[in-house]
Every structure is written in structure tokens, then in C-alpha cells.
Amino acid sequence: MSVTLPRTPLYTDHYEYTMLEAALRDGTAELPCVFEVFGRRLPTGRRYGVVAGIGRLSEAIERFRFEDDDLEDLTSRGVVKESTAEWLSGYRFKGDIDVYPEGELYFPGSPIVTVTGTFAECVLLETLTLSILNHDSAIASAAARMVTAARGRPILEMGSRRTHEAAAIAASRAAYLAGFAATSNLEAGRRYGVPTSGTSAHAFTLLHASETAAFQAQIDAFGTDTTLLVDTYDISQGIRNAVAVAGPRLRSIRIDSGDLDVMATMARELLDELGAKDTKIVVSGDLDEYSIAALAAAPVDIYGAGTAVVVGSGAPTAQLVYKLVEVEGRAVAKRSEHKGTNGGRKIAVRRHKPTGTAVEEVVVSQGEPESQPGDRVLQAPLFRGGELVEQPSLEESRELLRQRLISIPWEGLKLSPGDPAIPVVQQRGGE
């Protein structure tokens, strides 16, 4: 399911108009150029990154337009001159874009996005592209680590109250891409078809004269196929009250505080004693990949993750950059200390053993890698001549990521700090 959205707001930075204004004036605006999006490094300790946000980016580029009120604002504040505003009035991206598909893994130096077109039309997409991909890839990368830590147990995303309202929707989508089972964010469900799930908060229990009355009200409304929050007062008594009201067929209880390992063990024993052997235990409360991993031996059925996932679990940005690498077929590169780039358009392949395990990523600038058995070309078309190429669905991208995580060496899935899961080998054409 998708929802038609209005045109993209002008997610641009002032300096993009500075460059555009000058380039239109000196005649370089129409020079054919290639820009690339990549990360110089992964966030500290991470062994892989997850490409996310490509679907949102494609929608945003399709809707990227300058209306009369936008142009009036830009000229009235002296951002651009009237001649530049006239050029912007007809702006449509007409170039080509190639990408690592959403759900693909990336590593330092991976050419995640390649934008080809005139300097003017490409440079205006920098902030838009980075704002989407840096956010969504950070969330998906953190969420994927949580999914691995959960070892097949479902995780619910419930972090909407811990981030900006628009970011919450994007975070829900990215977490689902990474393997989360559902979200509490209803707009993510409406806009992207992400399954939604939720239960009551402590306020509902406090509203009623007793915990039993609150549970009864929830059961009356939803039947036993619901989740009762049992830790508003005393957890043991809360579990007893829940089973007394709902009976042994209650779907689940949720624990949101305390030592979750101890509380889950106690809850399982008590539920079994009360005959509610099939009632599941949901735990939440500032969970990240490390606390989820620590609960591996606990009788937890479902996790609820909030703050950690929507802020990237310590890495709120993927640290991606958008750099010019080619002008009129000529490689260009930045040489600044610690911020140098490799010039020229890149082509990347990932090499695999016959078993399917990835062994390295080969990135060649101004040329193509020598083909070997087990090679897989990483980029795929997103736009051709300004027209969007049909893309995989969110469900297909979700499955792609699942398969990619299987393909990397098992050491690459560790939560402990370490080198990237596979090395990236940079080559120049002809090597």
C-alpha cells in the first residue's frame, strides 16, 4: 500500500544555490557530471551498514519541484537572482541514478548511489539525498543488529515518542525493512503498509479504580487477543489479575520495567502455574541490541524497542557523503587530509565462495572489474532519463536484507567492535 504525497518540500541547503547561481553565470551548470554517495567509514564498532531509504528517495525526487511561492521566497531573501529563479521554475531531474538496492549491505567506500546528469540538476539533490539516506540507513543498520540479537523472536518498533514526528514514520519503515515485525506508528502503516500493533499504557491502568477494572475494560473491548500491561503496580499481582480477568487464553502480557531477565523468568513460572501456558511475554523498556542479546536465555517471546532504534542505537547518522567524482568524463577527486575521495565513476561487484559466502567487494573506478565466478554486480537502475525505474517492494527489500545477512561471514554479525564483515578493494580501470 502507498499513499500519494504532495510535492517534496525544498530540502536543500543555501550553499547549493550559491553553486547553482555561479555555475549558471559562468556556463558550467550544464557540464555532464557524476556524483556518488558513499561512506568513508562505518560508525565506530559496526561491521556492516544497511542501505535504506531508496524508496523514499525515489518518491522525493519525483516530486521535487519549485512552485511560485518557493521562488518568491528564494528571490525575496536574496538567495537567488531572478534569472536563477526562472531556471528553477522548470526544474525536473532528467538524468540517471543507479543505486545499491534497498536492503543491500554496504561497507566503507561502497558506491551506494551514482547520480549522472548536468552539474546543476545533480547538485540540487545533495541535501535531499543525504538527509533521507543518512537517517534511514542509520536506523536500518541498528535495527538489523537488534533483529540478529533477537534470534528469531519478533521485535515491535515503538519509538515514535522519542523522535521528530516525521522521522518517526521513516524510522518505522526502516526498522520494518530490517526485520522488525510491526510498529506502533499508524502513519507508517497507512503510508507504507507496515503492520501495526500496540497495547495500552500505564495511564489506562491509572485511570481506573483498580488494575482489575482496567484489565476488564480492555478485555471487554478487544477480547483475549490483546496484551495486558502488568507492571503498573506489583508485577506478580498484575499477572494474577490479568489471568483472573482474561482467563488462560490471554494472548500476552507486557513488562516494561525492572530487571527484565528476572521478571520474565518469574512471569513465565507464574503464568504456567496459573494455567496460562500459551500466554506470551512481551518485554520493553530502553532495549537495544546489547540488552536484547543479554535476554537470549530468558523466556521472552517478543521485544519492544523504542528510543534506541529511532536514534540509530548510538549512531544517528550513517555518515554518508555526496561527492562529485567526474566532470565531462574526467575523474575529479578531493585531496583534503582525512577527507580524500577516489575520482571517477565506480562499478562494484561482490565476490562469493561457491557456498554463497561473501568474501570481498571490488570497486573499480573508470573501468569494470574482471568477471569471476560468484560475482554479483551491486548497483541497479533507479532513474533513467529522469523516469523512475520500477523498484522492488518493501517486502522484497526486507527479504533481500535477510538473504544478505546470511551471505556474510558469521563473524560479521557479532555485536562486538570489529573490522567490516568483508573488505572493500578499490581499483582503477585496467588494474
Image: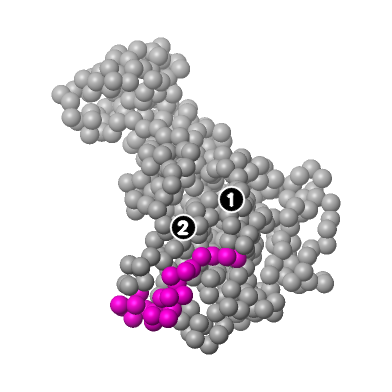
**Observer-nearest residue: 291 or 381?**
381
Display coloring: one colour
Pointer 2: residues within 10 angstroms few (<14), some, or many (20+)? some
Q: Position of residue 410 (x, y in %)?
A: 67, 45
Q: Which region is colored magenta?
A: 74-95
Q: Secondary structure at mark 1?
A: loop
The residue identified by callout 2 is 63
**Observer-nearest residue: 231 or 380?**
380
Q: Name the residue at 53% across, 37% down.
A: 150
Q: Is residue 81 magenta?
A: yes
Q: Secondary structure at mark 2?
A: loop
Image quadrant in which you'd find residue 269: top left
Q: Amino acid at mark 2?
A: Arg
Of tags 2 and 1, which is closer to the observer?
Answer: 2
The residue identified by callout 1 is 102
Q: Position of residue 401 (x, y in %)?
A: 61, 45
Q: Is residue 181 magenta?
A: no
In the image, taking residue 120 as reference, residue 418 lies left or right, namely: right
Q: Name the residue at 39% across, 48% down.
A: 168
Image quadrant in which you'd find residue 332: bottom right
The answer to whether residue 186 shows anywhere in this view is yes
Most distant residue in the left direction: 209
Q: Amino acid at mark 1?
A: Glu
